[in-house]
C-alpha cells in the first residue's frame, strides 16, 4: 500500500505545482568571483527573514517589491534600486497580486574594499533608492544575464558602484586602520582556502598575529560580519552551486561541509530565507 504523504511533502508538492503555474523562478547568471547575479520572479511572499554577508543590490523591473528591512516595511517600484547592507535582516516578496520581477547582484564586501583605499564600507540608510545613474550602472551588469562578465568590466563596474554607494551613504565611520585591515584580509583568505573544514580560533591567531577577540572586532568592522558567519556563508554558496548542478541535497550537505542534512537545511533557510528544496525547485523551473 502506498504510504500517505506527510503534510510537509504535500505542501512541497502543492507549491511546486503552483510555481510551475504562476511562473515563479530563479535564474542565475554565470558566476564571477565575489559577484553573483540572479533574476527572480515571484508571486506572494518569497523569502522569510534572513541575512547574508554580502551586499544585495538590485533593480525592480516589474511589479512592486515588498520587504522588511531595519524595522520598517519598504516598497520598491519598477526602475528603483534596492541597496541592502551585509548582515542586515530582511525578507521579500511581491506587494501586489500581479507578481514581481527583479534582478539583483550579491557583492562580497572585499571587492568594494579593494577600491575604497582603506575607507570603511559605505552604509546606505535608505534601502530603496530612486537614482537613474545607480540604476543604469547596475543594469550594465544585470542586463546580460546569459553572459559572463570580463575582468576589466568587473573592475570598472565595482569602481563605479563604490562611488554611487559612497554618494548615498551617510558620514562614514572611522577607519579601522591599515594594520587591522591587513589582519582581517589575511583571516578572510585563510577562511576561503579552508572553507570545507572547521577552522579553529588559534589558527587565525597564528595567521594574523592578533588574539581572537581583537580579530573578531576588526573582521566585523572590515567585512560587516564575523569570521564564523563568513566561513558558513562560503559553504552555503558552494551548496547553491551544487544545487544548480543538479546534485542531491544529501550529497550537497556532505560535500559543502555540513554535519548532516538537517544541519544544512537549518543554516540554508536562515541565510537565504527558504529551504534548499524550495530553492532547487525554483532553479529547476527556470
Image: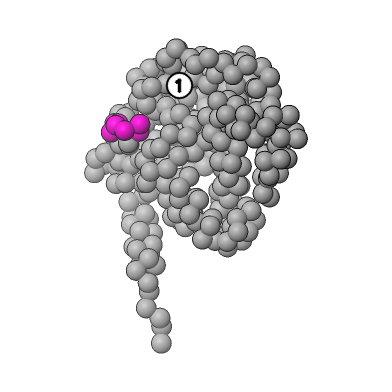
Q: Which residue is mark 1?
A: 123
- Label 1's element? loop
Residue nearest the viewer, comparing 214 with 173: 214
Q: Is residue 157 among the parts visible in the rendering?
A: no
When asked about the image quadrant of residue 116, the answer is top right
**Horizontal side of residue 22 vs 266, given as left or right:** left
Residue nearest the viewer, comparing 206 with 3: 206
**Horizontal side of residue 146 vs 133, given as left or right:** right
Magenta segment includes 71: yes
Secondary structure mostly taken by the magenta-highlighted segment of the chain:
strand
Q: Residue at x 39, y 17 (%)?
A: 132
Image height of 232 relative to 33, above or below: below
Q: Quadrant of the N terminus?
A: bottom left
- Across and down, in percent, residue 224 comes to 52, 29
Residue nearest the viewer, comparing 151 with 182: 182
Q: Residue at x 58, y 45 (%)?
A: 232
When asked about the image quadrant of residue 150, the answer is top right
Magenta segment includes 253: no
Q: Is residue 78 among the parts visible in the rendering?
A: yes
Q: Residue at x 48, y 45 (%)?
A: 271
* Colour approach in the figure: one colour
- Across and down, in percent, residue 222 comes to 58, 25
The crowd level at tag 1 (other Cα within 10 Å; few <14, some 14-19, many 20+) is some
Image height of 150 relative to 259, above or below: above
- Across and down, in percent, residue 172 comes to 48, 14
Magenta highlight range: 69-75
When asked about the image quadrant of residue 253, the answer is bottom right
- Across and down, in percent, residue 25 comes to 42, 48
Residue nearest the viewer, comparing 79 with 36: 36
Amino acid at each position: 500500500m502506498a504510504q500517505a504523504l506527510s503534510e510537509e511533502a504535500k505542501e512541497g508538492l502543492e507549491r511546486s505545482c503552483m510555481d510551475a503555474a504562476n511562473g515563479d523562478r530563479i535564474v542565475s547568471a554565470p558566476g564571477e568571483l565575489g559577484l553573483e547575479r540572479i533574476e527572480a520572479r515571484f508571486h506572494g511572499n518569497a523569502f522569510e527573514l534572513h541575512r547574508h554577508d554580502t551586499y544585495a543590490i538590485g533593480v525592480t523591473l516589474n511589479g512592486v517589491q515588498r520587504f522588511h528591512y531595519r524595522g520598517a516595511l519598504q516598497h520598491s517600484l519598477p526602475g528603483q534600486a534596492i541597496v541592502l547592507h551585509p548582515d542586515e535582516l530582511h525578507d521579500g516578496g511581491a506587494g501586489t497580486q500581479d507578481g514581481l520581477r527583479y534582478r539583483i547582484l550579491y557583492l562580497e564586501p572585499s571587492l568594494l574594499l579593494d577600491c575604497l583605499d582603506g575607507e570603511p564600507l559605505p552604509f546606505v540608510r535608505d534601502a530603496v533608492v530612486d537614482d537613474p545613474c545607480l540604476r543604469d550602472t547596475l543594469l550594465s551588469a544585470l542586463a546580460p544575464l546569459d553572459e559572463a562578465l570580463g575582468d576589466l568590466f568587473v573592475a570598472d563596474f565595482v569602481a563605479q558602484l563604490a562611488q554611487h554607494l559612497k554618494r548615498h551613504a551617510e558620514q562614514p565611520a572611522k577607519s579601522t586602520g591599515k594594520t587591522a585591515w591587513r589582519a582581517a584580509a589575511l583571516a578572510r583568505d585563510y577562511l576561503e582556502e579552508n572553507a570545507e573544514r572547521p577552522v579553529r580560533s588559534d589558527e587565525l591567531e597564528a595567521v594574523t598575529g592578533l588574539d581572537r577577540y581583537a580579530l573578531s572586532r576588526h573582521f566585523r568592522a572590515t567585512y560587516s560580519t564575523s569570521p564564523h558567519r563568513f566561513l558558513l556563508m562560503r559553504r552555503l554558496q558552494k551548496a547553491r552551486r551544487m544545487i544548480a548542478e543538479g546534485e542531491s541535497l544529501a550529497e550537497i550537505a556532505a560535500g559543502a561541509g555540513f554535519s548532516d542534512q538537517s544541519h544544512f537545511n537549518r543554516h540554508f533557510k536562515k541565510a537565504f530565507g527558504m529551504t534548499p528544496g524550495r530553492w532547487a525547485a525554483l532553479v529547476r523551473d527556470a
